[in-house]
Image (cartoon, grey):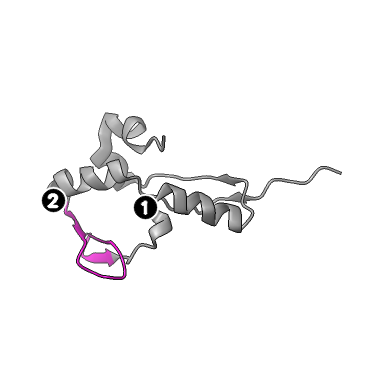
Amino acid sequence: MAKSPIIDIHAHFFPERYLKLLDEEGETFGIRLQRANPKGLMIEMNGGVQGPLKPAFTDLDLRLKETNRKRVDVHASFSRADQAKILGSNAARLLKFG
């Protein structure tokens, strides 16, 4: 019997290109990155703060190591509506991992 793949359907990853875009244009949409926290990047948005983000949320090599450690075969990663609004027609280009 073939082994079923392990799929992470709640995966978080923020490519550096996306974070750079947030740094440059996020204020327009009420989003600000906070990089001063020694524990990690924070994202301020809609009156709240998310984070600190674990390094594996922003570093693809660390994300892949974490995925392998957990024996995950596939990540299903989605953008939220507010992220798509910021990225607009550039979403596919900016979120491309490679």
Q: Is residue 70 above or below residue 36?
A: above
- The magenta span reads 30-49
Q: Quadrant of the N terminus?
A: top right
Label total for image: 2
> Can you identify the residue that label 2 sits on?
27
Mark 2–mark 1 Cα distance, whole angstroms, equals 20 Å
Residue sitting farthest toward the bottom: 38
Earlier along the polypeptide chain: callout 2 or callout 1? Answer: 2
> Can you identify the residue that label 1 sits on?
58
Q: Is residue 76 above or below residue 47?
A: above
- Using the image, tell me which numbered label, if any, was put on residue 1: none
Image point 39% across, 63% down: which residue? 54
Frontmost residue, 57 versus 49: 57
**Horizontal and vertical percent position of residue 37:** 24, 69
Image point 12% across, 47% down: which residue? 28
Q: Residues within 10 Å of mark 1 (few under 14, many from 20)?
A: some
